[in-house]
Every structure is written in C-alpha cells, then in structure tokens.
Image (cartoon, rainbow, N blue to C red):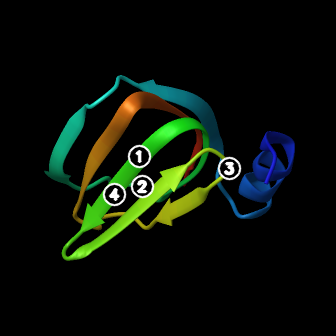
Amino acid sequence: MDEAAFREQLQQNGYGEISIKEIAANHTEPTHTHDFGASILVLSGEISVTMGDRVETCGAGDTFALDANIPHAEQIGAEGVRFLVGRR
C-alpha cells in the first residue's frame, strides 16, 4: 500500500492524528501500553512488536494495527525504522 492510500484509509477509519515517526536502529521499548489505538505503514526499516508469545515483524510496505491498552514490546531493526502512524 502506498502512503497516500494509507492516509486515506486512516482517515476513513477514524484515525485523526497522523504523523511520521522515526526510531533509531536497534532501539528496544520494553512491554508497555498506549491509551490510544494505532495503525502504521512502515516506510523504511523494520519493527517487531511482541504481544505475549506472538511477534509481528513489519518491513517497508507492511501495515500493522494495535488497539489501545494492549501490552506489547517493540524492537527496531538494524537500519532503524520510519513509519506513518495514525492514532485514535
């Protein structure tokens, strides 16, 4: 999916706060939650999200969504990651 189509999809699904985020290579966020739902489109690099015993790894062109208050950890790949994110 391209960036323009993803932005349109975010708006149609009620994601009002849309921004681009970059995270440095090999960064790790320990288990935490957010008080908002998020949906991302990876523009470059790689991110892995661990939820219990399930791991979702996303690279350029992949999308991922997570509801609010879901415990998860994040691991950024060796090249860092840049993604478009919508919050609701």
- Would you call the spot at circle 2 few (<14 residues within 10 Å), some (14-19), or many (20 or more)? some
Q: Residue at x 54, y 61 (%)?
A: 64
CB contact under 8 Å: marks 1 and 3? no
Q: Is residue 88 above or below residue 27?
A: below
Residue 22 as seen in the image, left or right of residue 2:
left
Count neighbours of disc 3 (C-alpha within 10 A) and say few if under 14, some if 14 to 19, many if 20 or more.
Answer: some
Which residue appears at 41% of the width and 46% of the height?
47
**Gap between marks 3 and 2, in whole Å?**
23 Å
Q: Nearer the viewer, residue 26 or 20?
A: 26
Which badge, 2 or 4, is on the more N-terminal residue?
A: 2
Q: Residue 18's x, y, as percent?
A: 64, 38
Residue under the image location 20 percent in, 76 percent down: 53
- Specify which label sits upstream in the sequence, 3 or 4: 4
Q: Which residue is mark 3?
A: 61
Q: Secondary structure at mark 4?
A: strand
Q: Residues within 10 Å of mark 4 (few under 14, many from 20)?
A: some
- What amino acid does circle 1 point to? Ile
The residue that mark 4 highlights is 49
**Residue labelled with disc 1:** 47
Helix, strand or loop at disc 3? loop
Tell me the distance, in whole angstroms, between the alpha carbons under discs 2 and 4.
Answer: 16 Å
Q: Which mark is residue 8?
A: none
- Depth-wise, is mark 3 or mark 4 nearer the camera? 3
Closer to the chain start, of discs 3 and 2, is 2
Kindly identify which residue carries mark 2.
Answer: 36
